[in-house]
C-alpha cells in the first residue's frame, strides 16, 4: 500500500509536469515564427562563407533580403553566376548578366622597385604603419605598405604580401571586398575578371617626384591616353586611370607606357 507521502510526491511531480507542458505550449504559440520557405531555400543555395561581401550580415541576412525583394538574386559575389541562377529559379525571376569580378592592387612598388627611408619594426598592420612618422617607411606615401592587413582579413586566402606588396591570387579571389574595405590607402578595388590591363600605381605626385622613389610608378605623361584607340584611358591627378567598360583589351596602353606602370593581367 502506497503511503500518503509517496502519493503526494507523485502528485506534485505530475502536476508540475502538466504545468510546465502548458507553459511551453503557450510560449510556442506566442513566440512561433513562421519560416519563409523561399528564404530557407535561398540560404541553402548560398555558399555559406558569411564573408559579408554581399553587403549584409552573413548569408542569412543576404537570404532574407533577397526573399523580401530588397536585394538582387545575384547579390552574392562568392557564388557567382551558378548561385545566381539557382536563386533566380527560387524567386522566379531572371538572373540577368553576372560579371565575375576580382580584386586588384594598384601598386607594383615592391622592395626591388620602390625606395625606403627607414626600416619599420613595429606592428604588422597597415592601419598602424600609415600613422607612423612619414606615413610608413616607403618614400612613396601612396603605395602599398606591405603590412598584410588585407591578407589576414581575406577569408579565401586569396591575397598575400610578396616582396613588400600585396598580390592577389585571381583564381582564389571571390570578390568579397574585404581587402578593398580595410586598405587604409584605398589601393585595392574590384575590376572585371576578364580585364587585361590595369594601372599598377596610385601616386598623385608629379612625374619627377615619382621617378625618384619608384621605378614602375606612373609619371602622368599621358602617352597611354593619347594612344588608346577607344578613349578608355585618362590621366587624373597625375595618374592614369582605365575605364574598364570602354577598354577593348588591345594592350596599346601597356605597350606604350614608358615606366611599365600599366600591367598586363590575366
Image (cartoon, rainbow, N blue to C red):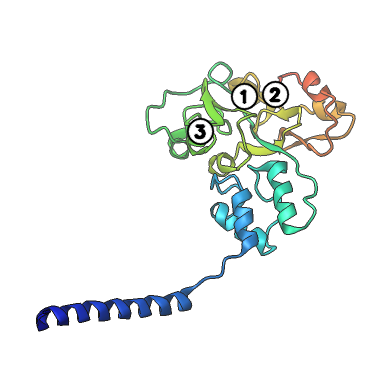
Are dots 2 and 1 in contact, CB under 8 Å? yes
Q: Position of residue 3 (x, y in %)?
A: 9, 81
In the depicted structure, whether residue 260 falls above or below residue 122: above
Given residues 49 and 242, the one toward you in this image is 49
Q: Is residue 236 left or right of residue 214?
A: right
The residue lying at 57 percent from left, 52 percent from top is 59
89 or 59: which is nearer to us?
89
* Residue 18 found in image quarter: bottom left
- Image spot of residue 239 (x, y percent): 71, 33
What kind of element bears circle 2? Answer: loop
Residue 266, placed above or below residue 128: above
In the rendered structure, the answer to whether residue 238 lies left or right of residue 139 reads: right
Work out whether mark 3 precedes mark 2 in sequence or the reverse, and give the earlier one: 3
Label 2, on which residue?
261
Rendered residue at 63%/18% (across/down): 215
For disc 3, the neighbor class at 10 Å (few under 14, some 14 to 19, many from 20) is many
Number of the front mark, 3 or 1: 3
- The answer to whether one can see residue 262 in this image is yes
In the figure, is residue 182 to the left or right of 129?
A: right
> Along the horizontal axis of the image, is 258 left or right of 67?
right
- State the separation of the CA atoms marked 3 and 2: 23 Å
Circle nearer the N terminus (2, 1) = 1
Specify the label residue 151 is tagged with. 3
Give the quadrant of the N terminus: bottom left
Query: Which residue appears farthest toward the top when viewing the image?
Result: 112
Badge 3 vs badge 2, beta-carbon distance below 8 Å: no
Label located before the other in sequence (3 or 1)? 1
Nearer the observer, 74 or 1:
1
Query: Vertical placement of 179 versus 58: above or below?
Result: above
Task: Identify residue for label 1.
Answer: 108
Residue 187: which quarter of the image? top right
Amino acid at each position: 500500500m502506497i503511503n500518503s507521502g509517496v502519493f503526494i510526491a507523485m502528485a506534485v511531480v505530475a502536476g508540475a509536469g502538466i504545468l510546465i507542458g502548458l507553459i511551453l505550449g503557450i510560449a510556442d504559440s506566442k513566440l512561433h515564427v513562421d519560416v519563409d520557405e523561399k528564404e530557407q531555400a535561398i540560404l541553402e543555395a548560398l555558399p555559406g562563407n558569411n564573408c559579408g561581401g554581399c553587403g549584409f550580415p552573413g548569408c542569412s541576412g543576404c537570404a532574407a533580403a533577397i526573399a523580401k525583394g530588397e536585394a538582387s538574386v545575384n547579390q552574392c559575389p562568392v557564388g557567382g553566376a551558378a548561385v545566381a541562377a539557382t536563386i533566380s529559379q527560387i524567386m522566379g525571376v531572371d538572373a540577368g548578366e553576372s560579371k565575375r569580378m576580382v580584386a586588384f592592387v594598384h601598386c607594383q612598388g615592391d622592395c626591388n622597385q620602390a625606395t625606403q627611408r627607414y626600416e619599420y619594426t613595429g606592428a604588422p598592420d597597415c592601419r598602424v604603419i600609415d600613422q607612423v612618422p612619414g606615413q610608413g617607411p616607403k618614400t612613396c606615401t601612396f603605395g602599398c605598405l606591405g603590412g598584410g592587413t588585407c591578407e589576414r582579413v581575406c577569408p579565401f586566402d586569396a591575397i598575400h604580401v610578396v616582396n613588400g606588396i600585396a598580390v592577389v591570387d585571381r583564381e582564389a579571389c571571390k570578390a568579397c571586398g574585404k581587402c578593398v574595405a580595410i586598405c587604409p590607402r584605398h589601393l585595392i578595388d574590384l575590376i572585371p575578371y576578364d580585364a587585361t590591363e590595369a594601372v599598377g600605381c596610385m601616386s598623385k605626385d608629379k612625374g619627377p617626384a615619382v621617378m625618384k622613389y619608384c621605378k614602375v610608378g606612373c609619371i602622368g605623361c599621358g602617352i597611354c591616353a593619347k594612344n588608346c584607340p577607344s578613349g578608355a584611358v585618362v590621366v587624373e591627378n597625375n595618374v592614369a586611370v582605365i575605364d574598364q567598360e570602354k577598354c577593348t583589351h588591345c594592350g596599346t596602353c601597356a605597350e606604350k607606357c614608358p615606366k611599365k606602370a600599366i600591367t598586363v593581367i590575366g
